[in-house]
Image (cartoon, rainbow, N blue to C red):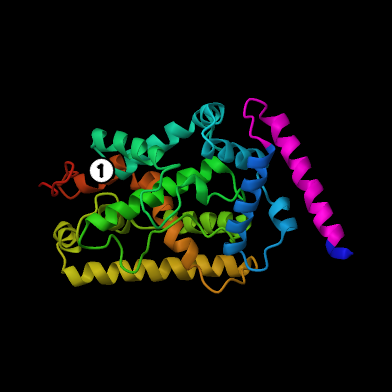
Amino acid sequence: MAMDLAKRSAGMREILLYHFCRLQLPAVPLPLAKFQQHVKRTFGLFQSRTPNATWESWYDNLYAVDWYLCCGCIEGLSAAWERLFASRTGRTDCLLLDALRARAVRLYPRDEEKQESAVTDFWSHLIISDSPTAPAILARYDGQRPLAPWLIRVFQNWHLSKLRVKNVEHMLPDEEIGLPLPEQADERWHDAFGQAAREWIGDLKDDDVLLLGLRLRYRLSQREVAGVFGINEGNVSRRTDRLRENCLNRVSESLLQQGWTGDDLSGFIQTEMIALLLDDPRFSAEHLASLLAKRGQRLPEANSELRH
């Protein structure tokens, strides 16, 4: 009997969710049958990523309107796509497309053609996968975080992955850029990690900022960076390792003081750290240029070496 009551309760909640979403987005007429299919599909995603997942926990943490909008886009409803085009990001309140373009500028400095194609490319793969073994981007969204920030994070990591594939050397040792932050991670810890990481970034010395900036933003090899600093290539590797270790220790200590009980921070480090660094004003092209100017050097042209 308890199981019957649970099923009945879940069924009622599903119907209530459907009518709530229809009221919020009346221009997106997703049929009930399709809606129910997406509920089952999305819960399956959530279940595969979250130990001991329950329907109740999925419903309780669902960003219902964002999730419904995503389902409408997957079904090809034009009104849903129009709404997604017009959606805005949280803190900055700028259009999603503008936020993606801003990220593209950081990823591909001084290469306007690549910046534009980066956004177009990403948008075209929202419902068509770029791999036969992986689902399309929107099909990976399970509704457990706001849609626009999630898409921005996926965009960042998607292009960082592509950039690393094209380079023989990794941008940073032992770093792996994958999908967005693991979905089971509590949003509280995502925010706490971001705050602790930004504090660590704020305390970096100018030389460390320049080293990381040349490796990350301009993807220079260790040998090229060693030439800028006039040091041995092995010293660049050791300094990078030291910075990474220092970051892990500093951020771990901060999170542990707040009650963090996770096994490690690899999920956050792998998906968040590079984006946080590139977003910091000290890692902007302008600031890196000023640091280089002090050394009598200037920023590289697209795909070229630093020039004296």
Q: Quadrant of the N terminus?
A: bottom right
Q: Position of residue 218 (x, y in %)?
A: 24, 50
The residue lying toward the viewer, choosing from 281 and 27, is 27
Identify the amino acid type marked 1: Ser
Q: Identify the residue shown where x is 74% and y is 36%.
A: 20
Q: Residues within 10 Å of mark 1 (few under 14, many from 20)?
A: some
Q: Is residue 56 above or below residue 27?
A: below
Query: Is residue 19 in the magenta section?
Result: yes
* Residue farthest along the right direction in this orientation: 1
* Residue farthest along the front direction in this orientation: 33
Q: Position of residue 45 (x, y in %)?
A: 58, 57
Q: Identify the residue shown where x is 41% and y is 45%.
A: 155
Q: Is residue 99 left or right of residue 9?
A: left
Query: Is residue 58 in the magenta section?
Result: no
User: Residue at label 1?
Assistant: 290
Q: Identify the residue shown where x is 30% and y is 36%.
A: 117
Q: Is residue 269 left or right of residue 51?
A: left
Q: Position of residue 175 (x, y in %)?
A: 36, 65
Q: Identify the residue shown where x is 61% and y is 39%.
A: 66
Q: Is residue 84 above or below residue 304?
A: above
- State whether the magenta stretch is mostly helix, strand or loop: helix
* Picture quadrant of residue 209: bottom left
* Picture quadrant of residue 246: bottom left
The residue lying toward the viewer, choosing from 247 and 82, is 82
Magenta stretch bounds: 4-31
Secondary element type, mark 1: helix
Q: Position of residue 284 (x, y in %)?
A: 33, 43
* Picture quadrant of residue 172: bottom left
The residue lying toward the viewer, choosing from 83 and 271, is 83
